Amino acid sequence: MESIINRINQQKFWSFHGGVHPPEQKTLTNQKPIKPLSLPEQLIIPLQQHIGRQGDLLVQVGDHVLKGQPLTKSTNPMAVPVHAPTSGTITAIKHSVIAHPSGLSELCIFLNVDHQDTWVERTPCNDVATLTNQEIVKKIADAGISGMGGAGFPTHIKVDTKPDINFLIINAAECEPYITADDLLMCEHSESIVDGIKILNKLLNPAFILIGIEDNKPKAIEALKKATAGIEKIHVCVVPTEYPAGGEKQLIQILTGKEIKSGTLPIKEGIIMQNVATCYAISEAILHDTPLIQRVVTVTGQALEKPQNVWALLGTPVHYLLSQCGFDNQGMEKTPVIMGGPMMGFSLPTDTVPVIKTTNCILAPSYKEMPSAFEGNSAEVECIRCGQCADVCPTNLLPQELQWSAKAKDYPQLNKLNLSDCIDCGACAYVCPSHIPLVQYYRIAKAEIRQQQQQELKAEKAKARFEARKQRLEKEKRARELKHKKAAEARKAAMNKATPEATEAKSAVAAALARVKAKKAANQKSPSSSAISAPVETTENQDNKKAQVAAAIARAKAKKQAKPAPEIDAKENAKVEPSNTDSKKAKIAAAVAKAKAKKSQEKAPIQGQEQNQEQTDSLSLADKKANAIAKAKAKALAKKQASSNNDSSTASDLTIASTAESEPAIDEKDAKKAAVIAKAKAKALAKKNKESNTDNKVSEKNTVNVEPRKVQNTSETSTINDTNNISDKDAKKAAIIAKAKAKALAKKKLATQSVSEEKTMHEQEKGAK
Amino acid sequence: MTDYLLLLVATVLVNNFVLVQFLGLCPFMGVSSRTETAIGMSFATIFVMTVASLLSYLVTTYLLVPLNIEYLTTMSFILVIAVVVQFTEMVVHKTSASLYRLLGIFLPLITTNCAVLGVALLNLRSHHNFFESIIYGFGASVGFSLVLVMFSAMREKLANADVPTPFKGAAIAMITAGLMSLAFMGFTGLVKL
Amino acid sequence: MTLLIAILVFGLIAALFGALLGYASIRFKVDADPIVEQIDAILPQTQCGQCGYPGCKPYAQAVADGEAINKCAPGGEDTIKKIADLMGVEAEPLDESHEKDNRPKVAFIIEEDCIGCTKCIQACPVDAILGAAKQMHTIIADECTGCDLCVAPCPVDCIEMRVVPETTQNWLWDLNSIPVQQID
């Protein structure tokens, strides 16, 4: 430590490996003072302008907000709030293109400026010594301050009191060409910056404070030296101009000679770094209770008449800044505008992108200045293995090797070559004689590697859950088996005693077995019946089980074969059925009918192709339309009927819905009609037989499937409320039968009350088509 | 002592079995696509060659020569080599199943590696004594491993590089091996044996 | 005579070596085949069954026994390549019987239509559906592997597969223009 301080005092610094010296181009903007801008018409404020999560919204559309009013609240340490940069009305909160190279949209608040610029109430603090560290950190968090040097890490996490800080380093290097925002901020507001540094000193209590600044900013150096004249702890360190001396790890290496190990943070070495603009923001927040609502942005480039630094409100669209600085797009259609500097910036997809907390520069180059930004084709050629890239890499990596592995997508090799240490500075791409966009390849590779790691994590979790589920099922199975065994033993013991209860149980068991046998017999008989004959058969047969089975099979047959069934039958049967008194059931039935219609529609196109190729297209269009209409109708009507208790119209609407769905396609219509017949029949029979036999397993299952919520139970449904679990196959059958039941009930009611009504409705449908 | 050292240098570099005497090319081309497999293979070969040359010497000196059945040399050598390879295979399977999978068919193919049989026969021809035989076998395998590992490293780089399509794969590998061979010609005359 | 001696000597050597190898085979016996574990580690663990096996572990076992390696649809080309490297076989393109659209999807229950039947819960291989009988069901999106097994059992057809949206977090850096070039 001593040696470090000695060398610092002597201004003898270290250096980092590599580095380039691109032309600085700072004279475009560093001669003029920072210009405060007039208010734009609209501000677009993204909810997330930092690394971490976005906060929760505190405002809604239509709210009038004051300048400095918080718009989001942070419930998570990694969330930083955003504030209204000026007073106005919120007109929209929606997705809009943000300042990210992907051009993707994220949630933004659209604020229409009322030009009053009324502040929210502020309480400035005169003496920082009266505040505790916790209070200061909270104020920093509430002011929405995140790192303004480009990364945007939430500041309150970084400056939360930690033990044993050796160095607090203030990054005033600003190594990238064209950018002079920090330079001018230091020239004009060095006092405030030093106030901010003093606050940080109070929070972190470092052994030494170093301000790292490049030697191409003489005025700023003067200003800083004057402002820190009385404070011994702060050393202004002037380092030679080089790109990228302003990178965190590079500046640490220059000033202290320490190399931060790969994958670790500077805090491990007891070093914390903050940008000068962040220090300024901290002093504004603590001393003047002003949240982070504006920042200095360098608007530069030879395509502008008046390139200069401006005080830009956060959320100002880039086109406003450009127009304020006299943007001339030189008659070209696609003039590129770059957010950030020439080395690390990205071109903007549209000029409505807003300024955010990490925007330090808007660069509008002219064609002569930067021809490559205008050309669509890349000038990339093969790598000539010159090795210049490795010479300039500040992190001591091997860009050439990285490039081969990145192009070959060899991710294990990339990890071995420490791709994760690349800081995306662009020095390697700058010197490449073959114009290979190296940083682009690295970014793609990094994104892929990150995604792979996430997928591996996900796979691990999924595997663990799968294993856990298997175990749970095993456990349940064993428990069930044990229970069965115990019950069986108990029954055996009971039966062997020959008591009256035992004999009764025996006979009950015998009866049950007989029933099962009968069911099996019925199953074997009915597979041969067709859809048409099924109703006839079952009307004759009074046996409960046979009817259910036949109905189910009939339904299945109808679906599979799609044979044309006489329409007359359908109508007749529909009239006979009772209608449903329960509106909820109707809604469910409608939904199920919709699902059925969708399912059968998927099967229909195949049949259509077989029969009539030409008509299929027009038919399917009509299908879709009619289906959509029918679905919407069914939904809307079902909802309507839920409030009003008009049973008959519910039923009729259902009928319309179901018939409308089946009408569009000739093939489908018949198929559905057949299905409807079968369902209706089944329902009727099930209902009839239910009354004669209390042991109706079908209706029991029906309740489980069709009654998810507790609704008013009619007399009909009350008998259905016994629940018993049966096997899955039967359940499926029963479920579908039950749906049919509900629908048929509806039809029945309609039929008994208004037969003619249905007819007219039917005709209306046809007429509408 | 110096003789043994010179013998070692000669076998590893000057008369390198792969690049100068062109023996053992099959595993050289087959296993060298990845460096991990190459290193695993080289360890296996070192063990096999050293033990095989030792055992062959013993079999020749104490069994074949006294009983005047030198005509069984080739057969007995192959027997010895096959047994040693089988033993090695079992050890590798037990200790590192992944290496066993990676090497795959090439592990039992060490039996047919002409370098191993070549070492045994050349030992015989040069009338080496016990220690010389061991060193000769060890040197040969070290030379083989050295070249194998270097070649695999180069092939890994070649896999990612922009090789013209007609040369991709085995073609560029052969050319590289030829160039390496040319390079090893620089050792000629280093040691006069 | 020499012939007899030769045969005897040879037989002796062979017997000796045979004994040695026999001993070695017992001493160095390998019990389980960890290759199955390694293959299973490569598979994506969606437990979807698209390969024809009830889960990823059974498919890993099958691959170890010689099954084709190109059956895993969620794994894609990447997985096939890795298994090919591990098994030392040729990497084949993905089996044609799988769907073309392989973007990652997550299931979503349309809650207005859900009837609380628990059929999808029983179908999900990783228990990513929250719900109970007669209660609303919902998909836990973070746990959903997009295996598609819940869509079929739903009696009211209320589950649909939605493509995972592209955000700045999972954007994969399409080659657009990043201006890094000479400034004169």
Image (spheres, rainbow, N blue to C red):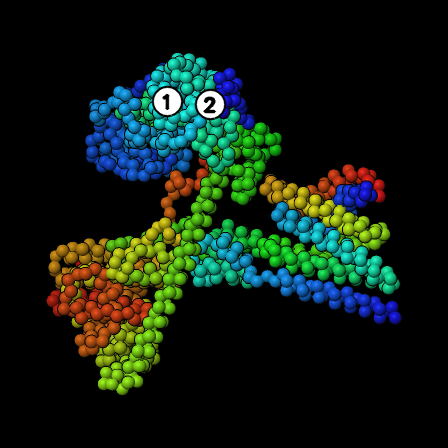
Across and down, in percent, residue B99 comes to 61, 53
The residue lying at 70 percent from left, 47 percent from top is B145
User: CB of mark 2 within 8 Å of CB of mark 1?
Assistant: no
Across and down, in percent, residue A326 comes to 36, 20
The three-letter amino acid code for the residue at tag 1 is Ile
The residue lying at 70 percent from left, 63 percent from top is C20
Q: Dot 2: what SS?
A: loop
Quadrant for residue A55, please give it: top left
Q: Is residue A735 left or right of residue A184?
A: left
Q: Nearer the viewer, residue A80 or A263?
A: A263
Residue A382 visible in the displayed image: yes
Q: Which mark is residue A197?
A: 1
The three-letter amino acid code for the residue at tag 2 is Cys
Q: Are marks 2 and 1 on the same chain?
A: yes
Question: Label 2: how many residues lie within 10 Å, few (<14), some (14-19) or many (20+)?
Answer: many
Q: Nearer the viewer, residue A669 or A124?
A: A124
**Disc 2: which residue:** A175
Residue B104 visible in the displayed image: no
Q: Dot 1: what SS?
A: helix
The residue lying at 25 percent from left, 61 percent from top is C134
Q: Nearer the viewer, residue C48 or A539?
A: C48
The residue lying at 33 percent from left, 56 percent from top is C129
Q: Is residue A686 left or right of residue B126?
A: left
Quadrant for residue A391, please give it: top right
Quadrant for residue A321, please give it: top left
Q: Nearer the viewer, residue A705 or A615?
A: A705
